[in-house]
Image: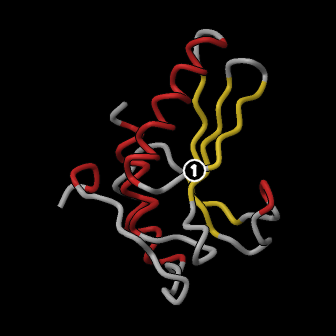
Amino acid sequence: MKLASMKCEACEGGTKPFDRKRAAGFLRQVKGWKLQTSSGFLGAPATTKRIEKEFLFKNFLDAVKFVNKVAKLAESEGHHPDILLYKYKHLRISIYTHSIGGLSVNDFILAAKIDKL
């Protein structure tokens, strides 16, 4: 099934996060996203695995417009990424399932949907 056609589902705290092998399998389905380990990124615990992608826009307003599209999408999915806008037109989106402190299928669904924006 295509990730972009799936819907994020509530993920409970008792759910086990993906190991590196399982995450790598899903990573092949989303272009340009990279698997990272947190090292405390934006307040995440130091061992949290996440997926991350960098975006470059023509200007600040285009970057902000994209952030707003991502925000609407994230709200509709009930799954919210960490977003960093820097150097006025560079954007880094980092996704992990906060409730389990790691990766779940929801992260890859959201990444696939972001790529379609």
Tell me where residue 35 appears, x and y as whole percent. 58, 60
What residue lies at 27% left-to-right and 49% top-to-bottom? 4
Q: Height in image: 58 above or below 37?
A: above
Decide if residue 1 is on the left or right side of residue 100. Answer: left
- Quarter of the picture containing the C terminus is top left
Decide if residue 101 is on the left or right side of residue 117. Answer: right
What residue lies at 36% left-to-right and 47% top-to-bottom? 112
Q: Height in image: 90 above or below 61?
A: below
Tell me where residue 105 appears, x and y as whole percent. 39, 68
Tell me where residue 82 appears, x and y as whole percent. 64, 48
Amino acid found under the numbered disc labelled 1: Pro
Of residues 19 and 9, the one drawn nearer to the viewer in this rendering: 9
Q: Height in image: 91 above or below 102?
A: above
The residue that label 1 is drawn on is: 81
Residue 78: image quadrant is: bottom left
Q: Height in image: 6 above or below 57?
A: below
What residue lies at 51% left-to-right and 87% top-to-bottom? 16
Tell me where residue 32 appears, x and y as whole percent. 48, 43
Residue 42: image quadrant is: bottom right
- Give the total of numbered labels: 1
What residue lies at 55% left-to-right and 83% top-to-bottom? 13
